[in-house]
Image (spheres, rainbow, N blue to C red):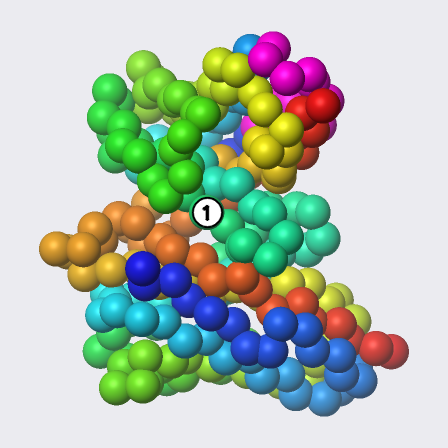
Amino acid sequence: EAQVTQNPRYLITVTGKKLTVTCSQNMNHEYMSWYRQDPGLGLRQIYYSMNVEVTDKGDVPEGYKVSRKEKRNFPLILESPSPNQTSLYFCASRTGSYQFFGPGTRLTVL
Amino acid sequence: SQQGEEDPQALSIQEGENATMNCSYKTSINNLQWYRQNSGRGLVHLILIRSNEREKHSGRLRVTLDTSKKSSSLLITASRAADTASYFCATAGGFLQGAQKLVFGQGTRLTINP
């Protein structure tokens, strides 16, 4: 089944404790991206990647890092999480104009 | 920013009625897409309309695009309880403005009452 998977789905952590949210797609898509969704703000793009080893900042990249060493994986790294990064995170991959979203990761930073 | 803005923010109708949601944006676009999100879950692509198209249909969905007014509307006909969800428009800019990037609006929360 064609899909985008994210792990973990739920995470509660404390300020400053590094964490990684994994994202994987099995559709051989070149383009992948990360979004965060907050009430009243809709979805905002954090980072995107046009292909392996090619990443670029989205609208709200501060406090996040990404890497794209393989086409299928696009992990999101929070080196020192802060409470304002509490949010619902979505990974997505894309072919042409059609974007496929993962199920989301609900992150709480205490 | 070319962010889309949906109107209304929330809409509640009776099952069987039609639901109309609107989206406005600020800059020129390559295409506009509509997505649906069930509570707390990932977004699902519904329909895409290109900048040179004015209307598109898919099942009970009808999308219109007016590039002169920088606006789009999504019509869901004969609504069902299962249509209860949030609906987002997303715009993709022209090549010189980053054709690969989608910018999402804040969404319309649609509730279908049985």
Q: Quick check: B93 left or right of B62?
A: left
Q: Residue at x 32, y 79 (%)?
A: B70
Q: Nearer the viewer, residue B53 or A44?
A: A44
Give the residue at x 27% y 32%: A56
Q: Position of residue A66 (x, y in %)?
A: 38, 22
Residue A109 or B78: which is nearer the viewer?
Answer: A109
Furthest-top residue in view?
A17
Above/below status of B18 relative to A26? below
| Disc 1, SS | strand
* Residue located beneath label 1 in the image: A44
Q: Does B107 sit above or below residue A33?
A: below
Q: Check residue A16 for magenta coloring.
A: yes
Residue A105 placed where, x, y %? 63, 32
The percent position of residue B15, horizontal first and vertical second, equals: 79, 82
Residue type highlighted by circle 1: Arg
Residue A34: in magenta span: no
Q: Is residue A43 above or below residue A4?
A: below
* Chain of the residue displaying label 1: A
Q: Quadrant of residue A51?
A: top left
For residue B82, what is the image quadrant?
A: bottom right
* Snapshot quadrant of residue A106: top right
The quadrant of the picture occupied by the N terminus of chain A is: top right
Magenta-colored span? A6-17
Query: Viewer-proximal residue, B2 or A30?
Result: B2
Q: Is residue A90 left or right of residue A33?
A: right
